[in-house]
Image (cartoon, grey):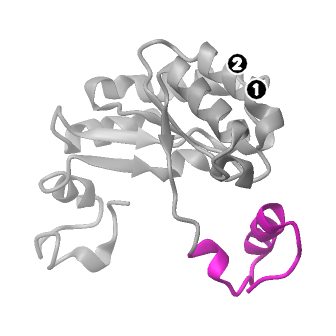
Amino acid sequence: MWADRRWVGTLFPAETRPGEELAAYATWCTAVEGNTSFYALPDGATVARWIEQTPDDFQFCFKVPRGVSHDRRLRNTDEEMGDFIRRLEPLGSRLGPAWVQLPPTFGPDDLEALDGFLTALPAAWDCGVEVRHRAFEADGSDERRLNDLLHSKGAERIHIDTRAVFAGPCETAAEIGTFRARAGSGLCW
């Protein structure tokens, strides 16, 4: 995130106007996670503004759209991924690794889909994969299979500390659904 108005006067200069936050952010950070692409792809004008507001060595690490990772679970995604890639290609050298955030229900039986997805990515695209299924944290054969697959494809593994997610209480439908997928029950702490 780079557009937090609460940062104006502290992390951003006091005269930072709305819409100038990215330029201010890029003076002291060299990269940012592009979480917005998880929900919707940016239009060309937005990408052009990002280019204007950042130096050549700045890196955007965009999340693969939710429709690809969660709805289609990395299957039959050529059209959606083609749109994602075309929208972001103008960033050129500013394009950092793509981030594939998978749902907690994406488990060992889905590794073939992950393999196919990573194989289909353009060779120039670096990629990191965040898994949340418990089997991939168990230090067993499923985790080794995942790590071997990622290594063979040149993809990074993104680790997330989920303790805060599961510390409860679960209040929203998303929190309850995540907890059920992870813990196998409807109970929240």
Q: Does residue 162 lie above or below 122 as drawn?
A: below
Left or right position of 87 against 77 = left
User: Tag 2, which secondary structure?
Assistant: helix
Residues 178 and 109: in front is 109
Residue 118 lies in what quarter of the image? top right
Residue in the image at 50% along x and 40% along y: 157
How far apart marks 2 and 1 lie (CA) works out to: 5 Å
Q: Position of residue 83 (x, y in %)?
A: 59, 25
Q: What percent of the width, then of the height, locates residue 93?
A: 26, 25
Q: How many marks?
A: 2
Give me the residue at 56% from left, 18% from top. Answer: 121
Residue under pointer 1:
113
Residue 25 lies in what quarter of the image? bottom left
Q: Is residue 69 left or right of residue 91?
A: right
Q: Which residue is mark 2?
A: 116
Residue sitting nearer the eye, 111 or 128: 111
Horizontal side, residue 157 vs residue 110: left or right: left
SS at badge 1? helix
Q: Magenta includes 107?
A: no
Q: Position of residue 155 (x, y in %)?
A: 49, 28
The disc labelled 1 sits on which kind of residue? Ala
